[in-house]
Image (cartoon, helix red, strand yellow):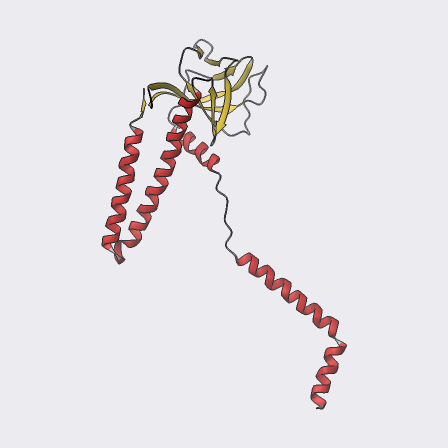
Amino acid sequence: MAFFDHIFNFIMQNLWLLVGIGLLAFVIMTYLKVKSKISYKVIDRKEIERLNFVEDMRFNKTNRWKWLIKGDRVLGKIENYLEFTHTGNPETKAMIGMVIKPMLITTGIRLSNPFSKSQPFLLENNDKIVQIRSKKEIIIPEFMGSDNIFGYYYAIDKDSKSKIENVIDYHLLKTDFNLQASRYFVKSQEQCVYSPEMALELAKKEKEIQLELAKKRGKAESI
């Protein structure tokens, strides 16, 4: 009994110390539990599409055009330039795709912002767009609006909005198809040893996606 009395007296004399140690242990265990949980990083689809377009345009450097202008403002320095056609309902459209570097200031001295990211820019190639080759300028009329979606900037009016959004839809679809085909490829490689039949089925799925994407790509042909 003397032994238990000794323990009881020790606990009573050090009650607050023991409570503090218990609380500290609880806090540490809770922190470790939270840290051990799987954290999910939000994917910025806008940034993915921006990077994909810049990568697609990397070999389309231009010395022919230098400045993209709207009214009296310089929107950006043209780094890459491509004229292409896009087939959709109901007609084939002539388009201009650009990668531009936004300006540090939009009036006065023409100086692009070295700290800004290069941005995709799309235009319908029609008689509303003024091209001054001697000044290397592409001029968007002041009356045209602008919009952006999924990292793509584009100039629009009532006639061209749906046409340009069809082009953007194609690029979004291309990203999704590539990701889906990649997943099937990885899974088929994993199954090669364990289940050759499953690997073959997954490889067929990947090929079907690639063929479907090839059909879609046929609707966007470079000039």
Q: For this rendering, which residue is in front, 87 or 217?
A: 87
x, y percent for residue 109: 58, 16
Q: Residue at x 56, y 57 (%)?
A: 35
Residue 136 as seen in the image, left or right of residue 183: right
Q: Is residue 9 above or below residue 181?
A: below
Q: For this rendering, which residue is in front, 138 or 208?
A: 208
Q: Residue at x 51, y 30 (%)?
A: 117
Q: Is residue 171 above or below residue 191?
A: above
x, y percent for residue 128: 44, 11
> In the current view of this chain or complex, which residue is farthest to the right?
13
Residue 186 as seen in the image, left or right of residue 64: left
The quarter of the picture where residue 11 lies is bottom right
The quarter of the picture where residue 169 lies is top left
Q: Residue at x 37, y 34 (%)?
A: 173
Q: For this rendering, which residue is in front, 24 or 89?
A: 89
Q: Residue at x 71, y 68 (%)?
A: 20
x, y percent for residue 13: 76, 77
> In the current view of this chain or complex, which residue is farthest to the bottom?
1
Q: Quadrant of the C terminus?
A: top left
Count up the numbered dots.
0
x, y percent for residue 99: 45, 25
Q: Quadrant of the N terminus?
A: bottom right
